[in-house]
Amino acid sequence: MNKLKVIHIAHASHSYFANEKDSLIDIVLNDWYFKTAVQLKKYYPKIEVECWAPEKLNKKYEEITKNRILLRFFPTTFSPIYALDFSLSMLKELRKEIKKSKKEDYGLVIHLHEYHNLHGLWIASFFKNIRIIAQHHGGSSPFKHLKESKKKRFFFLFFILAQLWENIILKNIKVFYALSNEELDYLRSVAPDSKSIFQTMGIEDIYFKKIKKDSARKKLKIPLDKKIILYIGRISEVKGVRYLIAAMENLKEHDLYILGYGNERESLENYSKEKAQSNVYFLGGVFKAKKLLYLSSADCLVLPSSKEGAPVTVMEAFARNLPVVVTNIGGIPLMVENNINGAIIRQKNTEDIINSVKEVLTWKKDIRKYANIYKWNRIIKNTVKDYQNGKN
């Protein structure tokens, strides 16, 4: 294999996902752009891999090395709202990297993590002669955003221009990994000559490790006689956390553990306190071995979101033999079969959460087998084929 370098580019400043209780570096290292890079380096160590990201908190360029991967953080030129980060220094550095690859004659691939954003469109506009792989993370086209919110109609002209830009520029991207049938239909309409397939992130082999529930609970000091409901993800209104908290009023004999970070955590914690709940626990960001223990301790996973791609937490739950309670959005219908490996509920519906949690907690099914297709080795092998299938 000729020398190949892959640059993974995050779609927004990581600080958008954090509040004062969260570690920014933990968020970076658990972002899927870095996790994908780690797995790529694991299975293909000869490929040179870097991770780039804009960061609105940075006043100057910064870099660190983790897992033999160089992470580079570029200060934003402006960052008015989430997904509109723009870093001129990042684009300049990317231009230098492209010139270097041509001079030294090595393959260069840009792996964009999300493309419905300002950086993604700029990169696809200016560097169309470089092989670009675009990973969907649940974002939406400008017109879809416009339909989702009445407030956004005040910026109607902006969304029209953004949609026109996407219609022209997305054709420059060679390969798309989409997370829903709706997104696949959209991509095939605006970029018919590009490869567009359903492909998710992956789950590590450790999630298939056999850990007894009682053993995991003892390590975490969780009662052995309780049913444990787990939520893992960004703590926000759009993820349906408020409805899940409300549901616990009728599930008082069970405990809810909320794992994740997000700048709406404090308001949702206060909501739980107002209800004087003693069975809801906010644990913040929990990662790696400890996260595995919580998944091994749980009885089901609930993700009542109103906006999703293909949630990795669902894959991880399957690997731990957990049934899931999820909404019928994004790529979830491609992952979950109602009443087979999970229960599909309506959005923003506390009653559905209550009824479905009670139902899945009675199941005695083999859920683990549904996780096999999400193993990293399979996903990375397919991804590298797309890296290599074409010339810069």
Image: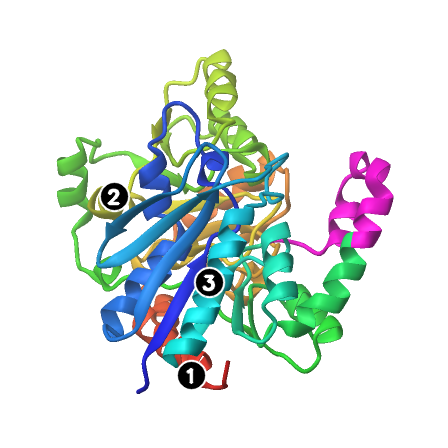
Judge left or right: residue 371 versus residue 148.
left
Q: Which residue is mark 1?
A: 388
Looking at this view, name the residue that lies furthest to the front.
103
**Which of the two discs, 2 and 3, labels the residue nearer the N terminus?**
3
Q: Residue at x 84, y 39 (%)?
A: 153
Q: Is 229 inside the magenta-drawn segment?
A: no
Q: Give the residue at mark 2.
A: 297
Secondary-structure class at tag 3: helix
Dominant secondary structure (helix, strand or loop) of the stretch shown in magenta = helix
Real-space CA distance between mark 2 and mark 1, rounded to the nearest whole angstrom:
41 Å
Label 2 – label 3 distance at C-alpha: 49 Å
Labels 2 and 3 touching (C-beta < 8 A): no
Q: Residues within 10 Å of mark 1 (few under 14, many from 20)?
A: some
The type of residue carrying mark 2 is: Ser
The tag on residue 12 is none
Q: Is residue 389 above or below residue 26?
A: below
Element at badge 1?
helix
Q: Residue at x 70, y 67 (%)?
A: 169
Residue at image location 34% in from the left, 71% down from the top: 372
Question: At 47% from the left edge and 54% from the top edge, which residue is drawn?
Answer: 311
Residue range corresponding to the magenta coloring: 139-161
